[in-house]
Image: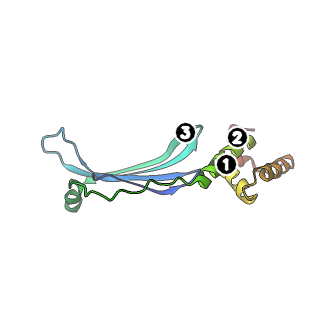
Amino acid sequence: MSFEVDVPLAEATLMLVVVSGVYSQIADRNPPIRSFKRTMIIVPEGSGYCITNEQLYLTNATVDQIKKAFKEPVPKEPQPAAVPNVEAQQKEAMVLKFSEASGMLPCYSLQCLEENGWDFDKAATVFTKLKAENKIPPEYFPASQP
């Protein structure tokens, strides 16, 4: 009951996840109680995700942390099921589709769609024109692409 998961930033191109808590190793006879905080930066890669940076901080737990950590949980009122943000899901799918069609990285595909009012066809027309005029920087594309 001592573990907490926090996601202070979650976007289509980057997610920050922080896991913290208190634990003891029950295999030891008199285990010390430890406190930890693990921070991960996660980005999309291929059809999955990749942890690009990770930090782990481990120390002995404080007296206050120990007191809070191993209490029985207080029953909570039932929470209504979360309603998924359909619009955000549709936009994320559109970014991935545009990224695949244009060959651009998802963050630049997002920028192109936002600048064109989320009109896929208009964004594609503007992209095609700018690409033909050689006005799209090479860093907008994955390194493996010419």
Instruction: Point out the tag, 2 or 3, that comes first from the N-terminus.
Output: 3
| Image location (x, y in percent) of residue 146 | 75, 38
Looking at the picture, which amino acid does disc 3 mark? Answer: Gly
| Label placed on residue 48 | 3
Task: Say left or right for 136 vs 21.
Answer: right
Mark 1 Cα shell of 10 Å, populated few (<14), some (14-19), many (≥20): many
Left/right placement of residue 90 relative to residue 29 reads: right
The residue where tag 2 is placed is: 100
Q: Badge 3, how many Cα within 10 Å: few under 14, some, many 20+?
A: few
Cα separation, mark 2 vs mark 3, equals 15 Å
Residue at 72% from the left image edge and 54% from the top image edge: 113
x and y percentages locating residue 8 in the rendered image: 47, 59
Extreme residue in the left direction: 29
Residue drawn 18% across the image and 48% down it: 32
Q: Is residue 105 above or below residue 79?
A: above
Q: Residues within 10 Å of mark 2 (few under 14, many from 20)?
A: few
User: Of the residues shown, which amino acid type is indicated by label 1?
Assistant: Val
Q: Position of residue 73 (x, y in %)?
A: 25, 55
Work out whether residue 137 or residue 96 is closer to the camera in this orientation and state it: 96
Q: Position of residue 71 (x, y in %)?
A: 20, 55
Q: Of callouts 1 and 3, which one flags the residue occurring earlier in the amino acid sequence?
A: 3
Quarter location, residue 88: bottom right
* Residue nearest the observer in this picture, 57 or 21: 21
Residue topped by disc 1: 95
The amino acid at mark 2 is: Glu
> Colour scheme used in the picture?
rainbow
Quick check: marks 2 and 3 in contact, CB under 8 Å?
Answer: no
